[in-house]
Image (cartoon, grey):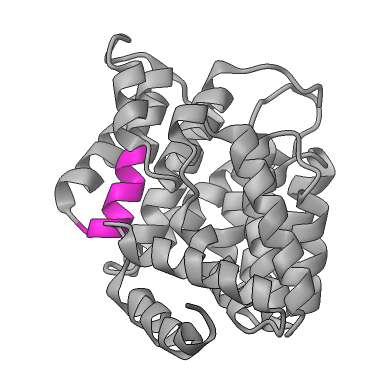
Amino acid sequence: MRRVSDERAAAYDFAEASAMFGRSDAALASVAELDAQRPTRLIVEGVLALHHWMRTGEARHADVVRRSFQMLLARQPQNPYALVLGLRYFLHAAKLEPLMLGLAWQTCQERLSWLERGDQEVVGRAEVLARCAEVALASDRPSESRRLFARALEIDPHQAEGRLRWAGLELDAGNVIVAAELFSAATNAPRSYHRLAAQMGLGVTRARMRDGPGAEKAYREAITAFHQWAAPENGALPKEILYNLGVVLASSADPLLRGEARELLQEFIARPDADEVRALRCRQMLHELKGEFP
């Protein structure tokens, strides 16, 4: 398959990155001038609404996601990003309505022959296969899930999204060595947002392996990737980096690193979007560090 530049792919990546790092309002404003039926706008609105729905559970966001992928598929039945959005909708809805998982797997089964064909140029084929791999895993088909992830990477070795999700699934399953290999392979992805996600995942994996220096290195590389992605005026570090790196450095024997940990943890607590559970842990660690600094 020949890789091509595609407006829909760019819109999907833009929306995903914006949602992950608190820039949903700016992303919506950037597409507000576009025609309401334009695929670019529908993809951005759908992805952002999906993240809001997953975070808040509000039905109005679910309605936006459903409207977005249904309108996209009505106009472009083989739009891979419409399929991805639809599969993500079904996967999340299945947490409350298990029958939705069956619809997701049925959708994948209907599309697999088209997705597997190599005689056509289809932007996003690997992305859809990777989502079908997630559906297979959720449907208790682990061997089929791994086959689909592997097939997605065979079609597009540069397909970072699938590699990252495969790594995350292996991490959740406790397969930290496999997860580390997959995250490491994604750290060379072309897009800085994917490199950021890969380094963050690698940091979590190294921390679980009790490799403090390896986790620290990964989180610092994540900071570099973040600054390559973020606009200068929006350069405040994501709270995940503040917390994860702060926790790792707090366990270091180096007084300078422990001092940096204190600054990171304090900055996390000061964030208005800091969750109370992690903020409480930060306060506990800061209390332990209190006697070391003036």
The image quadrant where one finds the N terminus is: top right
Q: Is residue 53 magenta?
A: yes
What percent of the width, then of the height, locates residue 165? 62, 58
Residue drawn at x 31%, y 69% is 275
The residue at the far front in this view is 294
What percent of the width, then of the height, locates residue 116? 74, 41
Compare residues 260 and 223 and report the one nearer the observer.
Answer: 260
Residue drawn at x 43%, y 81% is 286
Location of residue 121 by image quarter = top right
Is 164 located above or below residue 23 in the figure?
Answer: below
Location of residue 172 by image quarter = bottom right
Is 71 located above or below residue 268 in the figure?
Answer: above
The range drawn in magenta is 48-57
Compare residues 204 and 292 and report the one nearer the observer.
Answer: 292
Q: Is residue 74 magenta?
A: no
Q: How many marks?
A: 0
Residue drawn at x 29%, y 21% is 29
Residue drawn at x 24%, y 47% is 62
Q: Is residue 171 visible?
A: no
| Predominant secondary structure, magenta span | helix
As drawn, is 49 to the left or to the right of 201? Answer: left
Is 73 located above or below residue 62 in the figure?
Answer: above
What percent of the width, then of the height, locates residue 236? 46, 44
What percent of the width, then of the height, locates residue 127? 63, 41
Q: Is residue 189 visible?
A: yes
As drawn, is 104 to the left or to the right of 116? Answer: left
